[in-house]
Amino acid sequence: MSLNLPVRDNEKLGQLLARINASVALQTYWEASNTTAISRLHINDHGPVHIKIMTNIALKLLRLLAAADVTPNVVSDYELEPADAEVVVVLASCLHDVGHAIHRKDHEELSLILAAPLIDDFLDGLYDDRAAVLVKAEALHAILTHQRDIPPLTLEAGVVKVADALDMEAGRARIPFSTGTPTIHSVSAMAIRKVRLSAGEKKPIRIAIEMTNSAGIFQLDNLLREKLKNSTLAPYVEVLAEIAGDEEPIVQHYAID
């Protein structure tokens, strides 16, 4: 799978993207992650399609924050450039689930083991030694803290955490559910029709979610709300959900702010 991203004028991100797309090792880890998730555990996918969707979401979230003059931590803490924050977010997004190639359990920690040498290869020659170490450390931090219960300490890690949860359209929820099994997990996942990101009226980011029925609220309460609450993005995000198509909706509107 080729990862397509709107690189714009970020030269380092463009070079990183070319290296990611040329990496047989990373492509194989994505394949193995899906073998674990789909073929062996019979849960929803955690491989290349998820990575492609989630990485684009993460980059868009970061750029919405930048447009509102919200400063990434690599800039405020280390005097790197905003473009370097994009590199951190894309690295972490592409590598956050590779630990599934080993096991679903503790996959965040397992992802760190597999991701570290890949990051070294991807960053080789793009940065001086200091900047390369900092970008690597920030990406690994974001990988570890995409786990629901670990609070991120940077804006970039919060972006990755929330972006992971937002791959939820048309049954693609990040709460693992047994494929083909009619449970509240699978039914609520299928209720999410569309997720749209834009600048908010009161906050830098608006997440607008269209649901076909009220069951979708389970996804929002059990995943998105929790990840937002336990992230650095909570002050910058408003969530509005509407139910369309349910003849007798239990709830018509839902908001997280």
Image: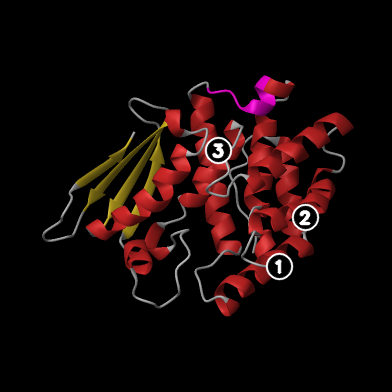
| Residue 60 image offset from top left, x and y in percent | 51, 40
Q: Nearer the viewer, residue 182 or 47?
A: 182
- Asked whether 73 falls inside the magenta stretch, the response is yes
> Mark 2 and 1 residues: CB-CB less than 8 Å, in contact?
yes
| Residue 61 image offset from top left, x and y in percent | 50, 38
Q: Nearer the viewer, residue 235 or 79?
A: 235
Look at label 2 and name its amino acid. Answer: Ile
Mark 3: secondary structure = helix
- C-alpha span from label 1 to label 3: 25 Å
For disc 1, the marked residue is 102
Label number found at residue 240: none
Q: Which of the 4 image quarters holds residue 113?
A: bottom right
Q: Earlier in the sequence, mark 2 or mark 3?
A: 2
For disc 2, the marked residue is 113
Q: Quick check: 169 left or right of 149?
A: left
Q: Is residue 7 visible?
A: yes
